Image: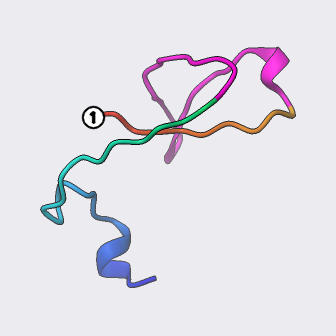
């Protein structure tokens, strides 16, 4: 991947928001918190071992 594009967001590139349709079992809405040089979201322990999809909404 081109490094110039790697650290830019869709908004930086002038792209508009897109709509996703996702089927699943549960949904949580949380704020990502700083964790060292990265971000972190805590999920319920019964989700361990499950597959999740993360969609940034803002």
* Left/right of residue 35 with respect to residue 7 in the rendered view: right
Classified by dominant secondary structure, the portion drawn in magenta counts as loop
Q: Residues within 10 Å of mark 1 (few under 14, many from 20)?
A: few
Image coordinates for residue 3, horizontal then vertical, percent: 37, 80
Identify which residue, 52 or 23, lies in the foreground. Answer: 23
- Extreme residue toward the left, this view: 14
What residue do we see at 25% from left, 58% from top?
10
What residue do we see at 34% from left, 65% from top?
7
Magenta stretch contains residue 40: yes
Identify which residue, 53 or 8, lies in the foreground. Answer: 53
Q: How is the image coloured?
A: rainbow
Name the residue beneath numbered marker 1: 58
Residue 37 in the image: above or below residue 55: below
- Residue 31 picture quarter: top left
Q: Which residues fall within the magenta stretch?
A: 24-48
How many marks overall?
Answer: 1
- Residue 27 picture quarter: top right
What residue do we see at 55% from left, 16% from top?
28
Image coordinates for residue 30, horizontal then vertical, percent: 47, 19
What residue do we see at 49% from left, 48% from top?
37
Magenta stretch contains residue 22: no
* Left/right of residue 43 with respect to residue 8 in the rendered view: right
Secondary structure state at the residue bearing disc 1: loop
* Left/right of residue 3 with respect to residue 34 in the rendered view: left
- Extreme residue toward the bottom, this view: 2
- Indicate the quadrant containing the C terminus: top left, top right, bottom left or bottom right: top left
Image coordinates for residue 48, horizontal then vertical, percent: 83, 27
- Residue 40 picture quarter: top right
* Left/right of residue 3 with respect to residue 11 in the rendered view: right
Image coordinates for residue 9, horizontal then vertical, percent: 27, 57
């Amino acid at each position: 991947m081109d490094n110039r594009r790697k650290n830019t967001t869709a908004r930086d590139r002038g792209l508009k928001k897109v709509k996703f349709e996702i089927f699943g079992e549960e949904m949580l809405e949380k704020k990502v918190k700083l964790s060292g040089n990265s971000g972190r979201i805590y999920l319920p322990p019964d989700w361990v071992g499950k597959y999740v999809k993360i969609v940034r909404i803002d």
